[in-house]
C-alpha cells in the first residue's frame, strides 16, 4: 500500500484494531438480525475516535487529516462490513466544504464533525446513476423531487440534494418523507420524496460542484470496496489453505493457484487506483480522471473477486452462515453507486475529449 | 575500493549538472537528436555512422553509458542522484544512451556481483565502451519454462571444458561476440549440476542459425555447440553455482521487460488520438464506433492503473529498503496490457493495420503490425505468464508447491 505518514499509520492501526475487536462481521450479523441500520454504541465509539471529522477543517471541529486518512479508516470498515453512516456523512461534509458559504459551514460542519448530525447525498433521480443531472426543481426556496435510492436516509438529518440548477441543503422534517427500500446488502436505503421542502443552496464552489461532490463519492466508495476486496481475498486464500479434498489441501492445485495469482494482481491494481484517487483528492490534481479510474477499477476488481470468493468457497459459500455472501451482496450495491463501469468509461472518454 | 562516487560529495550536484551540460554540448551531435532506436536490438545493429561511433566513444570514455557501474572497470562511478541528473540532462538535450544490450542490462550487473577480479577486468570495460555484444545461452529446445532441465554439457578436460549441445531463442546470437551460457557439469543433480560459462562465439564448433519469427524478423537464433573448447578461466563462480547466478540475472531481465514496456507506452500516442484519425467522430465529438470508444477508455484507465502500480512499487521498495511484493505482478500486468494495446491499435487501423510490406501503408502502420506480432513474445519470455503466476502463488500467497 501507499507509503503513509505517521498520523496516517496511527489512524490505520487504530481502525484496524477497533474493527477487528469491536466490530467484526459478527457485529454486522447482529445488526442485520436486529433489523437495525447500525449499532449505536459502535457509532458513538467512531465519533469519539474522531472519525466523523477526519476531512473537516480544524476551524470547524475536525482534524483535517484529509481523504487519504479517511480512506484508510473506511477500508478497515469495509473489511468487516461495519454498518454506519460514516461514508455518507463525510460526503455531505465534503459537499459543504466545497460549496458552502461561511455561514453554512459554521452551521453544519461542527455538527457533522462531532457526529451529532448525519448527512447524506440525495443525487440520483432514477435507479441508475447517469451523472450530475436532475429534474428536481426549486422555486422560492422550496425543493420538490423524488430520489428513489438514498443511502443512509433513515439515519440522516441532512440531505445534500442535487436539483436542476445546483446543489441544495435540505434538513429532514418539513416536506421530507421516506419510504424504506431494502436492498440486497440490507443496509439503510430509502426513497426520499421532497415536497416543497425548505432548501438552502450551496452557492460556492466551481460550476462543476455537483461533479466534484460525485468524484469524492466515487473515490471514498472505492476505498470501502478496496477493504472488502482485500478481506474476501484473504478469507478465500485461508479457506483454500485449510480445505482438503482428494487428500490434498485445495491450495496445492495449480488451477486454483493461478486463479488466486490473477485475483491478487487485480487486487493490487485496484489498490493503486483507489489510493491514487484518495491522493488526488488531497492534492486536487486531476481529480475527475483519478476518480473515474479509482471507481471503475474498484467496480471491476471487487466484482470478480466477490464472484470468485463464492466459487472458491464452494457450496459453503452459498450459505448465510458464511461471511463471503455478505460481501457479494454489498459489492453490487456499491458498484451501482455513483457510476457503474460503463458510465465511468463514458465519462473518462469525455474527459479525454473523445 | 574507492570509486569516484565515494570521493565526490553529494551536494555537488549543481557542479555535476554543469559538467554534463558541457559534455553534451561538446559531444552530442544535433543530427542524432531523438534518433535512439530501441528496435536496434531486435532488428540488428546495422551500420554505425561516423557520428554514431564518435557519440558512442565519447559516452564510453566517460563510462556514462553504464553510469552507476564502478569507475575502476570503466563505469561512470556515479551516485544514483548523479545518474538521475545525467538522465535528465540527456532527455532535455534529446540525447540517448548509445551503449546497451544484454551486456549492460543483464550480464554486466551479474558479473560485477559474482565474477572474479580477473573476469571483471577482462569483460566489464568493453561492455562500458559498447564494443562487445553479449548474447544469452539459456533456453534449449527441451528446456523452456523448465529451464533447469537443460542438457547442454560442459565436460571437464583438465585445462578446458568441452561443450556440446543446443541453445535456442538466443537473442542477437548472429551479431554477438560472446555468450553467457548455462551448461550442465553434473548430471546427478538437476539444479546444482548447472554452471555459468562464458563462450566466445567465434570458437570453432559454434554455429548460429537465425530463426524467422511470425513477425518476419529474426531477432532470435538457434546456437549449436559441437566439441567447443572453453578455457577453465571462463567459469563464473564455482562449478554448480550456475543456477543461483543465472536466476539473479533473470531478475535483471524481468525488471527491464516491465520497465521497458511502461516507457514505450509513455512515449506512444494515446489510442484515442489515433482512433480519431482513422474512425472520425460523430456530431458530439465522440468516436464513431461506440463499442471501440468504450474499450479504448477502459484500456487507457487500465494502463494508467498499471503506471500507478509501477510507481507504487518503486515508492514501497524505497521506503522498505527492499523489493516490494507487488513488483511480481508488474511483468504479467504490463505484458498483458502491452499486447492488448497492440491488438487495439491494429483493429483501429483496419486493413491498414494488417499490412505486411510494400505500398499502401505508412511506416507507422507497418511498424504496428510487426510490433503486434513481436509483442506476443512478452508473455512468454523472461518467465511466462504461467511461471509468474506460479511465483506469485508460491512466494507471495504461500500456496503449496504443486510439484
Image (cartoon, rainbow, N blue to C red):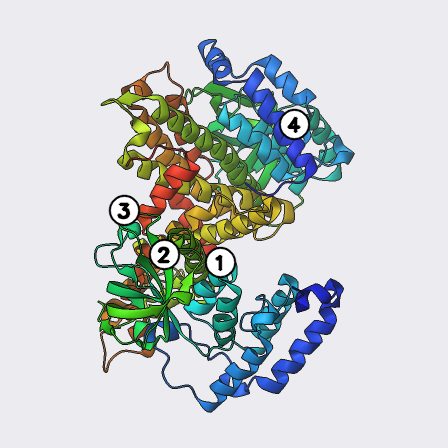
- For the residues labelled 3 and 4, the Cα–Cα distance comes to 66 Å
Instruction: Point out the residue furthest to the right here.
Output: A59
Do the CB atoms of the residues marked 3 and 4 lie less than 8 Å apart? no
Q: Secondary structure at mark 4?
A: helix
The residue where tag 4 is placed is A52
Crowd rating for badge 4 (residues with CA inside 10 Å; few <14, some 14–19, many 20+)? many
**Looking at the rendering, in which quadrant would you find the N terminus of chain A?**
top right
Picture quarter containing residue A118? top right
Q: Earlier in the sequence, mark 1 or mark 2?
A: 1
Crowd rating for badge 3 (residues with CA inside 10 Å; few <14, some 14–19, many 20+)? few
Q: Secondary structure at mark 1?
A: helix
Instruction: Point out the residue furthest to the top here.
Output: A34
The residue where tag 2 is placed is B195
In the shown orientation, is residue B93 left or right of residue B273?
Answer: right
Q: Position of residue A251 (x, y in %)?
A: 33, 30
- For the residues labelled 3 and 2, the Cα–Cα distance comes to 13 Å
Q: Which mark is residue A88?
A: none
The residue where tag 1 is placed is B114
Amino acid at each position: 500500500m501507499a507509503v503513509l505518514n505517521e498520523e496516517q499509520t496511527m489512524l490505520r492501526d487504530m481502525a484496524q484494531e477497533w474493527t477487528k475487536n469491536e466490530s467484526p462481521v459478527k457485529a454486522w450479523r447482529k445488526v442485520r438480525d436486529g433489523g437495525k441500520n447500525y449499532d449505536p454504541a459502535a457509532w458513538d465509539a467512531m465519533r469519539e475516535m474522531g472519525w466523523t471529522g477526519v476531512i473537516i477543517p480544524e476551524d470547524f471541529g475536525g482534524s483535517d487529516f484529509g481523504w487519504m486518512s479517511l480512506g484508510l479508516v473506511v477500508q478497515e470498515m469495509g473489511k468487516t462490513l461495519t454498518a454506519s453512516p460514516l461514508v455518507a456523512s463525510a460526503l455531505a461534509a465534503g459537499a459543504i466544504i466545497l460549496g458552502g458559504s461561511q455561514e453554512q459551514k459554521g452551521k453544519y460542519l461542527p455538527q457533522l464533525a462531532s457526529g451529532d448530525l448525519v448527512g447524506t447525498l440525495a443525487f440520483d433521480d432514477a435507479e441508475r446513476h447517469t451523472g450530475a443531472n436532475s429534474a428536481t426543481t426549486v422555486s422560492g426556496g422550496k425543493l420538490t423531487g423524488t430520489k428513489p435510492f438514498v443511502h443512509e436516509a433513515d439515519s440522516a438529518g441532512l440531505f445534500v440534494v442535487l436539483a436542476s440548477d445546483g446543489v441544495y441543503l435540505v434538513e429532514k422534517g418539513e416536506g421530507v418523507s421516506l419510504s424504506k427500500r431494502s436492498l440486497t446488502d440490507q443496509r439503510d436505503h430509502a426513497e426520499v420524496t421532497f415536497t416543497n421542502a425548505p432548501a438552502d443552496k450551496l452557492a460556492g464552489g466551481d460550476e462543476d460542484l455537483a461533479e466534484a461532490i460525485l468524484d469524492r463519492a466515487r473515490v471514498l466508495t472505492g476505498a470501502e470496496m478496496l477493504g472488502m476486496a482485500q478481506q474476501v481475498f484473504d478469507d478465500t486464500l485461508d479457506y483454500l489453505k485449510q480445505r482438503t479434498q482428494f487428500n490434498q489441501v485445495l491450495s496445492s492445485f495449480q488451477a486454483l493457484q493461478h486463479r488466486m495469482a490473477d485475483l491478487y494482481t487485480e487486487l493490487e491494481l485496484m489498490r493503486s487506483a483507489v489510493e491514487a484517487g484518495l491522493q488526488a483528492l488531497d492534492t486536487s490534481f486531476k481529480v475527475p480522471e483519478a476518480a473515474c479510474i479509482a471507481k471503475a477499477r474498484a467496480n471491476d476488481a471487487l466484482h470478480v473477486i466477490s464472484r470468485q470468493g463464492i466459487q472458491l468457497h464452494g457450496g459453503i459459500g452459498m450459505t448465510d452462515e458464511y461471511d463471503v455472501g455478505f460481501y457479494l451482496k454489498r459489492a453490487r450495491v456499491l458498484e451501482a453507486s455513483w457510476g457503474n463501469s460503463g458510465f465511468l468509461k463514458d465519462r473518462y472518454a469525455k474527459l479525454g475529449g473523445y | 575500493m574507492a570509486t569516484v562516487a565515494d570521493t565526490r560529495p553529494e551536494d555537488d550536484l549543481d557542479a555535476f549538472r554543469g559538467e554534463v551540460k558541457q559534455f553534451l554540448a561538446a559531444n552530442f551531435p544535433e543530427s542524432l537528436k531523438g534518433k535512439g532506436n530501441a528496435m536496434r536490438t531486435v532488428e540488428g545493429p546495422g551500420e554505425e555512422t561516423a557520428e554514431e561511433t564518435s557519440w558512442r566513444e565519447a559516452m564510453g570514455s566517460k563510462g556514462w553509458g553504464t553510469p552507476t557501474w564502478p569507475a575502476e572497470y570503466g563505469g561512470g562511478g556515479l551516485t544514483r542522484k548523479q545518474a538521475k541528473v545525467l538522465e535528465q540532462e540527456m532527455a532535455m538535450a534529446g540525447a540517448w544512451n548509445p551503449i546497451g544490450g544484454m551486456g549492460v542490462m543483464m550480464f554486466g550487473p551479474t558479473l560485477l556481483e559474482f565474477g572474479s577480479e580477473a573476469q571483471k577486468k577482462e569483460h566489464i570495460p568493453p561492455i562500458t565502451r559498447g564494443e562487445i555484444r553479449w548474447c544469452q545461452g539459456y533456453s534449449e529446445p527441451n528446456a523452456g519454462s523448465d529451464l533447469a532441465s537443460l542438457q547442454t554439457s560442459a565436460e571437464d578436460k583438465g585445462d578446458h571444458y568441452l561443450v556440446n549441445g543446443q541453445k535456442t531463442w538466443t537473442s542477437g546470437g548472429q551479431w554477438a561476440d560472446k555468450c553467457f551460457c548455462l551448461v550442465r557439469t553434473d548430471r546427478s543433480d538437476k539444479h546444482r549440476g548447472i554452471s555459468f560459462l562464458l563462450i566466445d562465439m567465434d570458437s570453432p564448433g559454434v554455429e548460429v542459425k537465425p530463426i524467422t519469427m511470425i513477425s518476419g524478423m529474426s531477432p532470435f537464433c538457434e546456437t549449436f555447440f559441437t566439441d567447443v573448447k572453453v578455457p577453465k578461466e571462463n567459469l563464473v563462480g564455482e562449478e554448480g553455482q550456475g543456477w543461483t547466478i543465472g536466476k539473479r540475472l533473470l531478475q535483471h531481465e524481468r525488471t527491464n521487460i516491465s520497465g521497458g514496456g511502461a516507457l514505450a507506452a509513455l512515449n506512444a500516442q494515446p489510442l484515442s488520438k489515433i482512433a480519431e484519425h482513422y474512425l472520425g467522430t460523430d456530431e458530439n465529438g465522440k468516436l464513431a464506433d461506440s463499442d471501440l470508444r468504450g474499450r479504448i477508455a477502459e484500456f487507457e484507465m487500465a494502463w494508467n492503473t498499471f503506471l500507478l502500480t509501477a510507481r507504487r512499487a518503486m515508492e514501497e521498495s524505497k521506503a522498505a529498503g527492499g523489493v516490494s511484493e507487488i513488483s511480481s505482478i508488474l511483468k504479467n500486468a504490463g505484458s498483458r496490457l502491452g499486447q492488448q494495446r497492440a491488438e487495439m491499435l491494429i483493429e483501429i487501423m483496419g486493413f491498414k493495420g494488417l499490412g505486411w510490406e510494400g505500398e499502401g501503408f505508412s511506416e507507422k502502420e507497418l511498424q504496428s503490425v510487426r510490433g503486434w506480432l513481436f509483442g506476443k513474445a512478452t508473455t512468454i519470455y523472461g518467465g511466462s505468464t504461467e511461471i509468474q503466476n506460479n511465483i506469485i502463488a508460491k512466494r507471495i500467497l504461500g500456496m503449496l508447491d504443486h510439484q
